[in-house]
Image: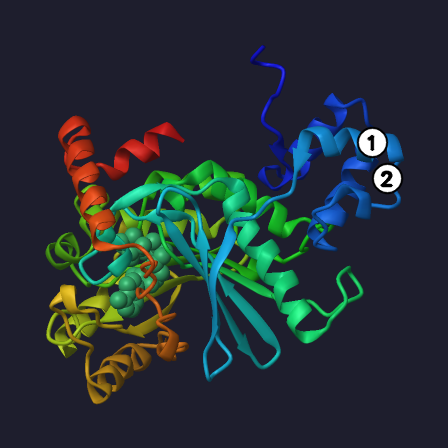
Amino acid sequence: MTGLMTAPVNLLDFDPAQLVAYCDSLGEKPFRAKQLQRWIHQFGASQFDQMTDLAKSLREKLATRAVVVAPSVISDHTSTDGTRKWLLDVGQGNAVETVFIPEENRGTLCISTQAGCAVNCRFCSTGKQGFSRNLTVAEIIGQLWMAEFELRRTKGIEPGPKGERQITNVVMMGMGEPLLNFEPTVTALKMMLDDNAYGLSRRRVTLSTSGVVPMIDRLAQECPVALAVSLHASNDALRDDLVPLNRKHPLRALMAACVRYLDYAPRDFVTFEYCMLDGVNDTDEHARELVALVQHGGPGGMAVPCKFNLIPFNPFPESGLLRSKNPRIKAFSQILFDAGIVTTVRKTRGDDIDAACGQLAGEVQDRTNVQERMQKMAGYKKKFGDDFGRIVEIST
Ligand code: SAH
Ligand code: SF4
């Protein structure tokens, strides 16, 4: 007889409300869900028999129908600067990366939301891989779950709320476009923010997007966290070329969305990321155009409250692009700075282990796989039209 064995549910797929609903379906009270959640997300437990304050009958019930499973680790490298990168298996030849960046007084985890990415920005090696698939909630929150407790194990710090938190900040800046995998991303965000899980403040969780305008508005309604927008260009013609999504959501619409978002955001500014590409987007003229854009490009000519984060391009051979020279980056940032815009230049971390921005490409994948994905992408484009990213957006 088939049908007797149903696949176990992965409890990492649930946000706090869904965990309550799941426990309810087992005839358990909401406080049980809270206990269960603490075991999983505060103690890193994956075995139900570890969960000693749950009734034995419940533990047995769970053991037959549920699991707690994060993607398995393929490789684990630590850079000389302390940056640690995990490559995670998400099945069918796909791998994604998670990067931990330790700094004084904080530890930031950079997590992925998709295997590959359909946006296909010119300067991004993830984009060059094409799109494979959206990550599930368990695969997204599983990165934080795995990393927090792995880091604690390495340092000998006890699990549980008393042990020192290793990850204090999360940035969704790994592989993929989080707003094109909206629901799972938001579900995972809710768990990150929950006091009975990681308890991160909204200000310490940053979602980075290439500018999926309608989804920026949805995020404002469903789970506002700090917002970073990958700008990379000071006018539409240039941005159309660098970030193809701009053809669909041009700068005017994007600036307006940023202003609307700020009414709900935990911070009173948007962070604009700007990848510095030699001779492409890094002249004084571009800097002045940028100043005008953010000072008068909002609705009705208003300013867009923002900070700039200039990212020195991390080159990869297929891109045909080069990193701006340091003096150029300095001159560029000076123009923004003189206009009164807070501007930082991102330090490159984890260079020696290929963990820097835009280098996350899942190096285990062989080239035939990339070919396959490119073909799949071409197929999707044929079927759904050139702007394939839209398909993902509609289905969320
Ligand atoms: N898809 C989202 C989040 C992931 S990319 C987004 O585009 O915002 C995270 C950041 O790394 C983005 O600002 C992206 O533009 C930047 N980035 C991508 N490739 C890069 C590269 N080769 N060098 C430097 N920054 C890069
Ligand atoms: Fe996708 Fe972001 Fe890379 Fe663009 S920069 S291809 S949106 S991951």
SS at mark 1 in the image: helix
- Quadrant containing the C terminus is top left
Q: Residues within 10 Å of mark 1 (few under 14, many from 20)?
A: some
Residue 346, above or below 143: below
Comparing 200 with 127, the one in front is 127
Q: Label 1 to label 2, Cα distance in Å?
A: 7 Å
**Circle 2 sits on which residue?**
54
Side of 21 relative to 75 (left or right): right
**Quarter that holds the N terminus:** top right
Residue 394: x %, y % from top left? 33, 29
Give the residue at mark 1.
58
Q: Report the amino acid beneath label 2.
A: Leu
**SS at circle 2:** loop
Q: Position of residue 292 (x, y in %)?
A: 22, 66
In this rendering, position of residue 142 left or right of residue 195: left
The quadrant in which residue 331 appears is bottom left
Q: Residue at x 32, y 80 (%)?
A: 337
Mark 1 beta carbon near ligand 1 (under 8 Å): no
On the rendering, which quadrant does ligand 1 occupy? bottom left
Question: Which percent across, then down, holds residue 169?
Answer: 56, 64
Under mark 1, the amino acid is Leu
The crowd level at tag 2 (other Cα within 10 Å; few <14, some 14-19, many 20+) is some
Residue 104 position (above or below residue 193)? below
Q: In this rendering, is residue 152 above or below 344?
A: above
Q: Is 262 situated left or right of 153 in this image? A: left
Quadrant assignment, res 31 = top right
Which label is found at residue 77?
A: none
Q: At x 15% / y 76%, what residue is drawn?
A: 278
- Identify the image quadrant of residue 377: top left
